[in-house]
Image (cartoon, rainbow, N blue to C red):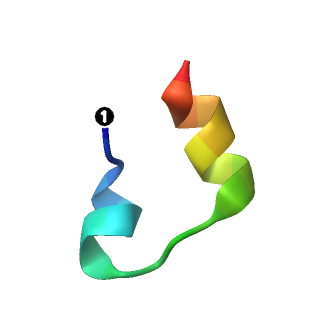
């Protein structure tokens, strides 16, 4: 599962982990 920010290239480790749930 990838967040919208990741798709745009704004990879944020913290958000990633939170959305990784």
The quarter of the picture where the C terminus appears is: top right
Q: Is residue 14 above or below residue 6?
A: above
The residue beneath circle 1 is 1
Badge 1 local density, few (<14 within 10 Å), some, or many (20+)? Answer: few
- Residue lying furthest right: 14
- Residue lying furthest top: 21
Q: Is residue 10 left or right of residue 17?
A: left
Residue at 38% in and 65% down: 6
The image quarter containing residue 4 is: bottom left
The image quarter containing residue 1 is: top left
Q: Is residue 18 left or right of residue 4?
A: right
| Label 1 SS | loop
Residue at 65% in and 33% down: 18
Residue at 28% in and 77% down: 8
Where is residue 19? Give x, y as percent. Answer: 52, 33
Where is residue 9? Give x, y as percent. Answer: 36, 81
Marks counted in the figure total 1
Where is residue 15? Give x, y as percent. Answer: 63, 49
Q: Is residue 1 left or right of residue 13?
A: left
Residue at 46% in and 78% down: 10
Q: Is residue 18 above or below residue 9?
A: above
């Amino acid at each position: 599962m990838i967040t919208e920010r990741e798709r745009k290239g704004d990879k944020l480790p913290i958000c990633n982990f939170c959305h990784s749930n």
